[in-house]
Image: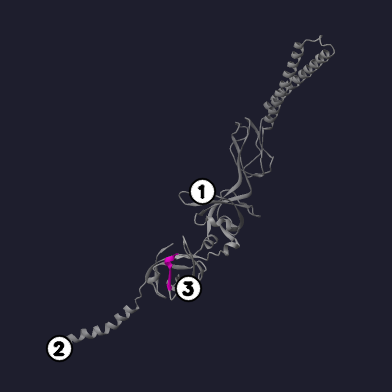
Amino acid sequence: MKIQRIYLVPLLIAALLLPACKEEVEKKEVIRPVRSVRVAGELQMLAGRSFPGKATATQQTNLAFRVAGPLTEFPAQVGDEVKKGDVLARIDPRDFQVELRNVQGQLKRTQASLELATSDYDRVKRVAAKDPGAISQAMIDNKKGALDSAKAQVQSLQATVATARDNLNYTYLRASYDGTVVETFVENFEDVQAKQSIIRLVDTRKMEFTINIPESLISRVADVETVLVRFDVFPDHDIPATIKEVGREASKTTRTYPVTLIMDQPEGLRILPGMAGKAWADKVSAELTKDTTGGPTVPVAATFTENGKSYVWVINEDSMTVTRQEVTLGRVTNDGVTTLGGLKGGELIVSAGAHSVVEGQQVRILEKQ
C-alpha cells in the first residue's frame, strides 16, 4: 500500500501542472519577423521632407584699389550699411594730382603746336593755289607731315590725360552696390597695392539658401511652387523663398543635386551669410497632385491577392500588429507598383514576408527603409 502511495503523488502533481503548461503554450504567440517600408510617393516624399542648408549673399565681393599708395581715409567699418557709390576708403591723391597737372600741361603745349602747324599748312596751301610756282611740293608735304605729327601727339596726350584722371578717381574706393561691410583687410595709413583686397562687401537685400536634393527627387523640384525656410536662430519664423537654380550634376559621394533658393530679407529679421537652417516644399503644383499614373508606390513583394482582390499588410506602429488593407493597383514602374486607391501615403507596410503573416498578428521589423 505504501508503494502505491509513492507512485500516486507524482502522478497527481503532474496532472495538476499539465493544464497550466498547456495554457502557457497556448498563450505564447509567434512574433513574425518582417521587413517594412514607409509608403510615400514622390509627392509625399518631397512635400513632407525638410533639407538642411546654409545662407549665402546674392553678391559678395572683395573690393580693391586699381592703383597703389598710402591710405589717408578709411571710414568704412565692419557692419556698416552702405549705398552704391559711397566712399569706403581713399588713397593719398597728391602724386596722382601732380601727374594729371603735368600731362594736362603737355597737352596744352601740344595743342598750341597743332594750331601753329594747322596755320602753316593752310598758308602754304593758299599760296600754292594762287601761285603754283611760288611754293614747292616738298614744302607742302613737310607742312602736312608736321600737322599730322601734331595731331597724333595731341591724341596721345589726350589719352594720357584721361588715364591720369582715371587714376586720380581710382584713389577713391567706392561701394559697387548697396550692401554690408563684413570684413576689412587693412588699416588706415597703410601702404596698399593695386588689386590688394581692402574690404569685403556683401549684398544682403536678397539671400540665397543652398540645399541638396537626392537624385530620386530632383525631377520633382520643378513642380514645387512655394518653399519655406526656417533658420535655426529664428525658429518661429518661416520665410518664403523661390527656386533660383538647380544644379546639373550630382555629387559623386552623396548622389545629391545642389538647389539654390532665393528670398527677400524678412521684415524685422536680419539673415546673414552662414546662418544654418532647413527648407521644405510648402506647396506643389496642382497638376502633380492629379498625376494619372497613380498614388503612392509600393514594392511589388508587399502586395498579395485573395479572391481576385489585392491587399497589403499595414503595420500598427503602437501595437506592432498587422491589418489587411485592400488596394487598387496601377501600373508597374521601376520603383514598384503604383496604387490607385487604398493608401494615402505615410503608412508603414510589410514589404517582405506578406504571405507569412495573418490578420492581427504581431510582427517584429527586421529592417526599415
Which SS class for mark 1?
loop
Q: Which residue is depicted at the point 16% across and 88% down?
A: 4
- Tags 2 and 1 in contact by the CB under 8 Å rule? no
Hey, what amino acid is under mark 2? Lys
Indicate the quadrant where residue 36 lies.
Answer: bottom left
Q: Which mark is residue 249?
A: 1
Of labels 2 and 3, earlier in sequence is 2
Of labels 3 and 1, earlier in sequence is 1
Name the residue nearer the viewer: 175 or 211: 211
From this viewpoint, is residue 4 visible?
yes
Can you say whether 109 is above or below 42 in the image? above
Q: Which image quadrant: the N terminus?
A: bottom left
Which contiguous range is marked in magenta?
299-305
Give the alpha-carbon distance from disc 3 to disc 1, as whole Å. Answer: 41 Å
From this viewpoint, is residue 231 visible?
no
Q: Indicate the position of residue 180 as horizontal and vertical percent values.
A: 64, 45
Q: Indicate the position of residue 285 as horizontal and vertical percent values.
A: 60, 61
Instruction: Name the side, left or right, on which 120 lies relative to 313.
Output: right
Q: Which mark is residue 360?
A: none
Hey, what amino acid is under mark 3? Glu
- Label 1, residues with CA under 10 Å away: few <14, some 14-19, many ≥20: few
Q: Which mark is residue 2?
A: 2
Q: Indicate the position of residue 137 as horizontal and vertical percent values.
A: 76, 12
Give the alpha-carbon distance from disc 2 to disc 3, as whole Å. Answer: 68 Å
Q: Farthest residue to the front: give it.
A: 132
